[in-house]
Amino acid sequence: MSHNPFVDELLNRYSAGDRAFSGVDLREQDLINVQLPEVDFHQADLRQSRLGKTNFSQGNFVEADLSEAILWGTNFTQANLSRAILREADLSGAILTQAQLTASNLIKASLSGANLSHANLDSALLIDADLRSGSDQQTNLSHTNCKGANLSYANLSGALLCRANLEQAKLCRAVLMQRSLGALSAADLTEANLQGADLSYADLSGVILHRANLRDADLTGAILTQADLTGAILPDGSVHD
């Protein structure tokens, strides 16, 4: 990490017990592999900052701007990122378990291999986000709340969505290709918009697709055993009884 007087002062203040850095300007700064749990970066400007592998667990990032920030492997366990801007941020391999991401902006963000288990993404924007599982690490969205989230054009290929709440989520043209059994086990896609989505080879056994929109969706090789398709709009436009 480069020696920046401003960053050094912040770290010294933190070491002395200060946690309040609301509104701080850390644009294009380096805070790599640093321990900063419970830090308060409410409304902070962290655009294009390099924060890889830093520990921000239980931190406050409400309305912070992290656009284009490098956050690979960063620990946001139980952090509050509600209404934060993470547009085009690199969150590859980041730990976001139990994080609050309500109404956050993750448009075009990279979340490949990230752990979002039990996170709250209610009404979050994940348009064109990369949520693909990597060759060595699976993207984990199990038990995640994505109710009302916009995942249109997002790539969720290989992601674990076991018991995820995707009720009323928008997944238009999203890629949900799955070849591992149980990846979507007990996921709730009630009234989700999956128009034009790629669900090829997905195991949708027992998945709730009640009144979901599957018009023009690709279900090639998909397993639909005991899936709840009541009232769903099927790929050909017909409505399932």
Image (spheres, rainbow, N blue to C red):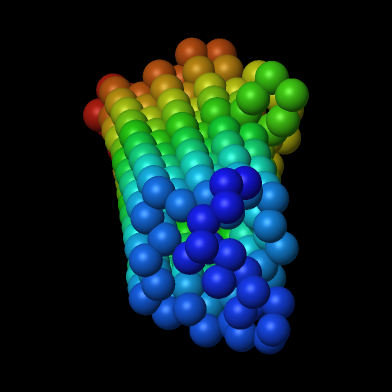
Q: Is residue 72 left or right of residue 107?
A: right
Q: Nearer the viewer, residue 144 or 168?
A: 144
Q: Is residue 10 above or below residue 190?
A: below
Q: Is residue 101 left or right of residue 178?
A: left
Look at 48% across and 73% down and name the residue there.
Answer: 41
- For the question of whether residue 240 can be seen, the reply is no
Quarter holding residue 207: top right
Quarter holding residue 159: top right
Q: Is residue 6 left or right of residue 232?
A: right
Q: Please state the total of marks drawn on the protein image.
A: 0
Q: Is residue 219 above or below residue 84?
A: above
Q: Quadrant of the C terminus?
A: top left
> Where residue 228 sits: x, y (%)?
53, 44
Q: Nearer the viewer, residue 10 or 188?
A: 10
> Where residue 114 sits: x, y (%)?
62, 42
Q: Is residue 123 above or below residue 24?
A: above
- For the question of whether residue 131 can be seen, the reply is yes
Q: Is residue 21 left or right of residue 84?
A: right
Q: Is residue 66 above or below residue 16?
A: above
Residue furthest to the left in view is 237
Look at 64% across and 74% down and name the residue there.
Answer: 12
Look at 49% across and 13% down and name the residue there.
Answer: 220
Look at 57% across and 47% down and name the residue there.
Answer: 2
Q: Nearer the viewer, residue 33 or 42?
A: 33
Residue furthest to the top in view is 220
> Where residue 66 sits: x, y (%)?
40, 55
